[in-house]
Amino acid sequence: MTTTTSNDAVQAPGTTLGAAPGAVPDTMQAAVLREAGKGLQVETLRTPRPRAGEVLVRVAACGLCHSDLHVMGGAISFPLPAVLGHEVSGTIVEMGPGAEHTGLEVGQQVAGGFLMPCGQCEACASGRDELCGPFFELNRLKGVLYDGTTRLAALDGEPVSMYSMGGLAQYCVIPATSVAPVPAEIDMVPAAILGCAALTAYGAVRRGADLRYGETVAVVATGGVGTNIVQVARAFGASQVIAIDVSDDKLAPMPGYGATAVVNSVTQDAREEVLRLTRGKGVDVSFEALGIPATWTTALDVLADGGRMVPIGLGAGVQTAEVEINRTVRRSQSILGSYGARTRQDLPAVVDLAARGVINYKDVVSRRFPLEQVGAGYEALHNREVQGRAVVDMSL
Ligand SMILES: NC(=O)c1ccc[n+]([C@@H]2O[C@H](COP(=O)([O-])OP(=O)(O)OC[C@H]3O[C@@H](n4cnc5c(N)ncnc54)[C@H](O)[C@@H]3O)[C@@H](O)[C@H]2O)c1
Ligand SMILES: [Zn+2]
Ligand SMILES: [Zn+2]
């Protein structure tokens, strides 16, 4: 890897918390992926420092998302060593220069969104944060931020890539474009899920589907993201929300999040059940939240004529799914991929939904691991043992 780190360079100091308890230490603990398939190891790294337009956040918690599993297993390639973790909550402890007009300040509690728009490209200029080219090219392909370098380094200076902000660490640097202040009443540990699971769900419902009041919905795969889609769809006025999964355990709490019916696609015929529940029509919108051929098939099978299928699940690398050509064409069905959301517009909206209790972010977080046990957390996620979301709680 040829990237350099900010730690090698002299840089103007930002505003710090001064003598407050939490003054930034020189080193920190972080979960590092050194080799795909070999799991994460907790190491001591240099504490990153923010550059222009960035903030340094002391992490309260970081959620464990299925997308990380794709990187950890090597199905989605990423420059290593790397710190993963892309949905965080925490407190701003330092501001880089050039963030004066963001309204952010040291001491503020924030949620960090995984999709970090550069704020300068054509897509960003048109408000389409989720299509930001530099985000893909620099962060998703090279593991760096917008000046082409990573903020992370091992003690010997070895650069360490950042998947999004590299949230599985005690501190992380985040572009100011992708943090949203959270009000005092927000519970900071479960708030970690706002930046991916809830943000992605909001993007799928608001942007992908453009869901309208009274429409009928199915959510295929009710894990961390799917559970949030159920909630957001209900909040947007869906008249029916049918939760579909292969696990009765995952389905059991769905009515509490707003599902009007649950279907186990192993023990029941999902299409038959959904047609029965929708007077033979199928649903107006089906969300797919796993990214495998089977869930695409289910989502398309339960769709009404003229319906919109919104896939959110990422495949394990290059993956294809079958679509019945004539049915899609003759029934005027749409397939509307949805990646994240428009961070700058939508993350504050998600925080607001959580703060007002419209979505329940607290109960979605069913398990909390200390950073030392992050490996056990991902193993549980891999083994499908996690209801809703698991998080690493930095206070444990
Ligand atoms: N588009 C985006 O912006 C975005 C953002 C975050 C995550 N993702 C992707 O979303 C997907 C879900 O992530 P997550 O963290 O919620 O995963 P998760 O592991 O928490 O949940 C997966 C769920 O799928 C269920 N499932 C397994 N096989 C199934 C089948 N055949 N039919 C129905 N359900 C089935 C499991 O029981 C589980 O409830 C992943 O592919 C992830 O990479 C995409
Ligand atoms: Zn995620
Ligand atoms: Zn951009």
Image: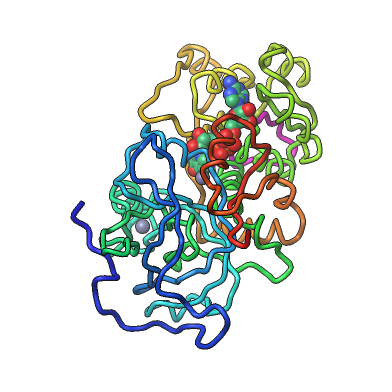
- In depth, the one of 213 and 30 nearer the eye is 30
- The residue shown at (43%, 58%) is 165
- Left or right, 82 with reference to 376: left
Left or right: 136 in relation to 228: left
At x 60% / y 56%, what residue is drawn? 192
Residue drawn at (52%, 13%) of the image: 327
Left or right: where does residue 262 sit relative to residue 149?
Answer: right
Quadrant assignment, res 267: top right
| Quarter of the C terminus within the rendering | bottom right
Determine the residue positioned at 72% across, 13% down.
Answer: 268
Q: In the picture shown, does residue 33 fall above or below 179? A: above
Can residue 376 be seen by looking at this rendering? yes
- Asked if one can make out residue 221 in the rendered structure from this viewpoint, the answer is no
Q: Tell me: residue 107, above or below residue 137.
A: below
Q: Residue 271's quadrant in the figure?
A: top right
Specify whether residue 362 is painted magenta.
Answer: no
Q: Does the magenta stretch include residue 211?
A: yes
Count the labels in the image. 0
Residue furthest toward the left? 2
Whether residue 333 is situated above or below residue 100 in the rendered picture = above
157 lies above or below 298? below
Q: Magenta span covers which residues?
A: 208-219
Residue 220 x, y percent position in the rendering:
62, 27
Where's residue 25, x and y in %? 45, 75
- Taking depth in this image into account, of 126 and 337 the one nearest to the observer is 337
Q: At which x and y percent is residue 21?
A: 58, 81
Q: At which x and y percent is residue 153?
A: 32, 62
Say how the picture is coloured.
rainbow
